[in-house]
Image (tube, rainbow, N blue to C red):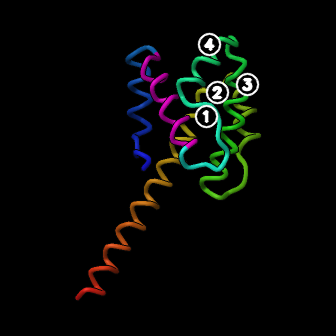
Amino acid sequence: MVQKRSIPLAILLSLITFGIYYLYWFVCVTNDTNRLGKTKTASGGMAILRAILTCGIYTYYWSYMTGKKMGEIDGSGSGAGLCLILAIFCLGFIVPILAQSTLNNAAEKTANKQENASIEKEWKSA
C-alpha cells in the first residue's frame, strides 16, 4: 500500500537537509508510482544512479514517465507532456510534488474503499 505523505513537510525537510531528504522522497515517489502505475520504470535507487551517471539527462525521461504513470494512476490521461516541460524549464523539482499529490489521492481512495468494505461487512453480519 502506498503511504500518504505530507507535501509541505517533504518540501521543508528537503530544504532543511539541503536536498538529502529530496533524494529519499524521489526514491519513494518512483517506487510508489511503479507500484500503482501500469508502466514500470527503474526503481528509485536505479533512477538516482542513472540521473547521476548521465549528469541529469535521465531526469527528463524520469519526469516524462512519471507524468505518464500519474495519468495511469488517477485515470485523467497523460500528464507526461506537462512534466517534461517542467523538467526542460528547470522546474523538475515540481514533478515529485505533483506525483505525491496523485499518490496521496490514490491512497485516500484506497482507504475509503477499505472503510466502505468493512462497513458493508458489519452491516451484513448484523
Quadrant where the C terminus sits is: bottom left
Name the residue at 44% across, 14% down. Answer: 18
Q: Name the residue under label 1.
A: 95
Which secondary structure, mark 2?
A: loop
Q: Residue 34 location, x and y as percent?
A: 58, 42
Amino acid type, mark 2: Gly
Q: Which of marks 4 and 1 is in front?
A: 4
Q: Residue 113 location, x and y as percent?
A: 42, 68
Labels 2 and 1 touching (C-beta < 8 A): yes
Amino acid type, mark 3: Phe
Q: Residue 108 location, x and y as percent?
A: 43, 57
Q: Eyeballing the image, is 99 above or below 89?
A: below
Horizontal placement of 15 versus 56: left or right?
left
- Is 76 magenta? The answer is no
Amino acid type, mark 1: Val
Which secondary structure, mark 1?
A: helix
Label 1: how many Cα within 10 Å (few below 14, some 14–19, many 20+): many
Q: Nearer the viewer, mark 4 or mark 2?
A: 4
Nearer-the-camera pick, 49 or 88:
49
Identify the mark at residue 89; answer none if there is no mark. 3
Quadrant in the rendering for residue 35: top right
Horizontal placement of 118 versus 101: left or right?
left
Identify the mark at residue 92; answer none if there is no mark. 2
Q: Nearer the viewer, mark 3 or mark 1?
A: 1
Q: Name the residue under label 4.
A: 52
Which secondary structure, mark 3?
A: loop
Q: Distance between the Cα atoms at labels 4 and 2?
A: 15 Å
Q: Which residue range is magenta in the image?
A: 19-34
